[in-house]
Amino acid sequence: MATNEFNIRRVAFGNAVYPPTTIGSDSSGATSLALIGAYIPKGAIVTGIRFFPYSQTDEASFLNAVVNVYCGGQALGTNNRKASEALIDAKAGTMAVAAGSGYVSVGGPLYLYFGASADRTGISGDCDVYVDYLYCADRDAA
């Protein structure tokens, strides 16, 4: 049995800027923004998701829009987190990890995903996103 000499708890960090033209007022579509520099490897187990938004403008307009974090096409968080609750200016927000233990089946860059809403007019700001995960590169060598 191999031993792990390194701490396997890690945090992927990225920031997304969403100007009003990116989010838009269209209720028919969703918007996905890359979290620059945030990456999670295949085989990681997500243990937590946190948001810290800055300089929000009119976050109440998110209404019933949902927010999530994706790695490729895989949702890492639950699908029912309201953006108007998770992304409140200068307050840390959290999101529950998706059912199924949060196992990342395909590694890759992270994206902040905004679902459709009745109105997103005037929303702007930026948000730091922290995704806590467990990963051991030596796993397959054991």
Image (cartoon, rainbow, N blue to C red):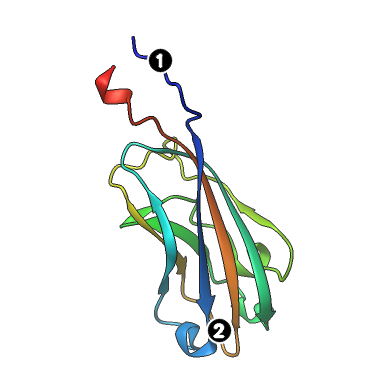
Q: Position of residue 124 (x, y in %)?
A: 59, 83
Q: Callout 1: few (<14), some (14-19), or many (20+) C-alpha neighbours within 10 Å?
A: few
**Residues at circles 2 and 1 in contact by the CB criterion of under 8 Å:** no
113 and 131: which is toward the camera: 131
Q: Secondary structure at mark 2?
A: loop
Q: Amino acid at mark 1?
A: Thr
Residue drawn at x 48%, y 90% as measured from the top left: 21
Q: Position of residue 53 (x, y in %)?
A: 65, 68
Q: Eyeballing the image, is 26 above or below 7?
A: below
Q: Disc 2 versus disc 1: distance between alpha carbons?
A: 50 Å
Q: Position of residue 1 (x, y in %)?
A: 33, 9
Q: Secondary structure at mark 1?
A: loop
Q: Residue 29 vs residue 122: left or right? A: left
Q: Eyeballing the image, is 87 above or below 58?
A: above
Give the quarter of the image for residue 28: bottom left
Q: Position of residue 27 (x, y in %)?
A: 46, 83
Q: Eyeballing the image, is 130 above or below 132?
A: below
Q: Residue 10 vs residue 41: left or right? A: right
Q: How many marks?
A: 2
Front disc: 2 or 1:
1
Residue drawn at x 59%, y 68% as measured from the top left: 127
Residue that carries the numbered disc 2 in the rendered image: 120
Residue drawn at x 60%, y 64% as measured from the top left: 82
The disc at residue 3 is 1
Residue drawn at x 67%, y 64% as measured from the top left: 85
